Image (cartoon, rainbow, N blue to C red):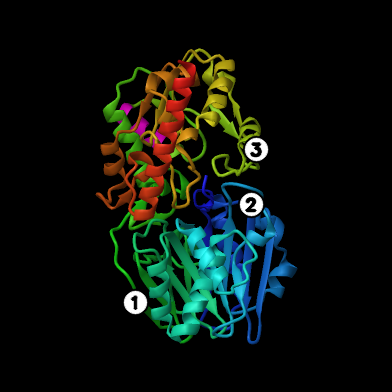
């Protein structure tokens, strides 16, 4: 498989500038804690004081990586932070963000959330042009490409335009320069979320609004797809529409990734998840005794089902909050071990009950298989599994950990086959219409992993090539068996 298909990340970005004398490192820390759900493998903070850019990166959680002492050493009135997870390979400090280079504009520091579909092509071009690359992270590609264009054009708008012309994929990017410019820019489809907030004291940018809210700014605005926003030292905010494209906001942000207290593209994530549940209850009949959400992202949808059906929501699964999210762990073995440590059934709630088990999505099916096994051992009578996302049947090239058709349970099995494999009595998937209505952004959402139709050309070609290779492989196996 081409390494184009392996380079994916979905992370969290936070940036800030103070218009006064306030040191920003503590607010970056707070912002990253708010975004910790987006990645637990590595984190980084970079700040600029009067003379120097300071960068400190670490593997692991934000709370374990920064002390009061290290935060005080990261002094400055402008800075960027990042939390990361990788989808393949090992976690290394060299791939942690933000990335810093020493020129032009007295240095550039950059972090992003997303994935470059043409990562290999852009990396090879930089290597041919003499750039020394030290990681396998696509954020390093972005910072070097932007730097090259700035050296060549001496103009930030033209440099970002040229970068967008060369890049394909998703990128919600925050950067600052040694000349004290804080800059946000976003891919023309706006696939991954990105927002900002400004008051008289400070300006912030973040992957989710909650990271800005927690730092004292209530009102947030989305960075528009293809837009560049510059937050100047004198308090001015400059907006430039660099490039236009069709809006295709990732539906998975509403289903799973984002915190329910975030707002994305003007839509409350919590409200969208309530509607996901309500729409399922309107679609499928049930005579279940209780509704049991898989914690935590399914709770809102379970509440929506309860509102529509009148069936009581019960905490049938207890979560160990010190174990991280399983879907975004890098290796399947780690994922499987984590499920057993993360969840424990409450027998008194489940025993002899007909339950609606609610989950946000089924990707590989391995996590759900273990959850169902736990619940069966607790003595449940009957399990109806309601999944608030339609079947995931295609890979994602934009920063969600869905790499190949072969690993997707819904791409390889019918609903009855999945019921048998997971050992549930009934499996009900969200309808496509129910998903679109719940998110309430019309056709402006990316559903590529559900439909196989991608908003960018290279991704579409890659998916079709993968599908063809898979068909040829399956045909060979069939011929060998017969």
Residue placed under numbered mark 2 in the picture: 41
Instruction: Describe the element under mark 3 as helix, strand or loop.
Output: helix
Q: Which of the two labelled residues, at mark 2 and mark 1, occupies the earlier sequence position?
A: 2
Name the residue located 43 percent from the left edge and 37 percent from the top edge: 469
Pointer 3 local density, CA inside 10 Å: few below 14, some 14–19, many at least 20: few
Judging depth in this view, the residue of 234 and 350 nearest the camera is 234
Q: Are marks 3 and 2 in contact (CB under 8 Å)?
A: no
| Circle 1 residues within 10 Å: few <14, some 14–19, many ≥20 | few
Q: CA distance from mark 1 to mark 3?
A: 43 Å
Instruction: Say which label, 1 or 3, has the lower sequence index.
Output: 1
Do the residues bearing badges 1 and 3 touch, measured as CB atoms within 8 Å?
Answer: no
State how far apart marks 3 and 2 are (Cα): 13 Å
Work out whether mark 3 precedes mark 2 in sequence or the reverse, and give the earlier one: 2
Q: Nearer the viewer, residue 474 or 192?
A: 474
**Where's residue 222, x and y in %?**
37, 64
* Quadrant position of residue 280: top left
Q: Is residue 359 rendered to the left or right of residue 90?
A: left
- Residue bearing the label numbered 3: 334
Q: Main secondary structure of the magenta part?
A: helix
Quarter occupied by the C terminus: top left
Residue 42 x/y as whole percent: 64, 56
Which of the labelled discs sits on residue 240, or is there none? Answer: 1
Bounds of the magenta segment: 301-309
Q: Give the left or right position of residue 433, taking residue 414 as reference.
A: left
Left or right? Give the position of 208 relative to 457.
right
């Amino acid at each position: 498989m081409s390494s184009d298909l392996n380079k994916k990340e979905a992370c969290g970005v936070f940036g800030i500038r103070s218009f006064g004398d306030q040191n920003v490192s503590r607010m970056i820390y707070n912002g990253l804690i708010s975004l910790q759900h987006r990645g637990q493998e590595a984190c980084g903070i970079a700040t600029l004081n009067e003379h120097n850019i300071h960068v400190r990166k670490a593997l692991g959680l934000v709370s374990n990586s920064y002390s009061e002492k290290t935060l005080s050493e990261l002094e400055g009135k402008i800075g960027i932070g990042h939390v990361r997870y990788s989808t393949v390979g090992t976690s290394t400090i060299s791939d942690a963000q933000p990335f810093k280079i020493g020129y032009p504009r007295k240095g550039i520091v950059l972090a992003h959330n997303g994935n470059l579909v043409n990562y290999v092509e852009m990396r090879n071009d930089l290597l041919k042009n003499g750039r020394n690359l030290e990681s396998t992270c696509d954020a390093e590609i972005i910072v070097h490409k932007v730097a090259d264009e700035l050296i060549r054009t001496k103009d930030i708008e033209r440099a970002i335009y040229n970068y967008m012309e060369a890049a394909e994929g998703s990128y919600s990017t925050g950067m600052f320069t040694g000349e004290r410019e804080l800059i946000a820019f976003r891919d023309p489809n706006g696939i991954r979320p990105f927002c900002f907030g400004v008051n008289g004291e400070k300006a912030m940018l973040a992957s989710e609004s909650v990271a800005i809210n927690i730092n004292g700014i209530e009102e947030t605005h989305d960075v528009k797809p293809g837009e560049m926003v510059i937050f100047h030292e004198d308090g001015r905010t400059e907006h430039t529409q660099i490039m236009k494209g069709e809006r295709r906001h990732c539906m998975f942000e509403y289903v799973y990734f984002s915190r329910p207290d975030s707002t994305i593209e003007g839509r409350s994530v919590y409200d969208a998840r309530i509607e996901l549940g309500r729409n399922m209850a309107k679609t499928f009949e049930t005579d279940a005794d209780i509704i049991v959400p898989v914690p935590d992202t399914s709770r809102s949808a379970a509440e929506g089902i309860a509102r529509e059906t009148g069936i009581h929501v019960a905490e049938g699964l207890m979560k160990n909050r010190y174990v991280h999210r399983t879907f975004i762990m890098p290796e399947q073995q780690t994922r499987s071990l984590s499920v057993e440590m993360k969840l424990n059934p409450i027998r008194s709630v489940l025993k002899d009950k007909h339950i609606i088990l609610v989950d946000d999505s089924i990707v590989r099916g391995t996590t759900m298989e273990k959850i169902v096994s736990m619940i069966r051992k607790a003595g449940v009578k009957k399990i109806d599994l309601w999944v608030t996302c339609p079947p995931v049947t295609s890979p994602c090239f934009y920063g969600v950990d869905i790499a190949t058709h072969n690993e997707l349970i819904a791409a390889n099995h019918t609903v009855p086959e999945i019921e048998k494999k997971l050992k549930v009595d009934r499996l009900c998937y969200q309808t496509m219409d129910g998903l679109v209505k719940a998110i309430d952004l019309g056709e402006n959402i990316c559903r590529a992993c559900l439909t196989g139709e991608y908003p960018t050309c290279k991704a579409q070609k890659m998916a079709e090539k993968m599908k063809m290779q898979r068909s040829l492989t399956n045909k060979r196996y069939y011929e060998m068996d017969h």
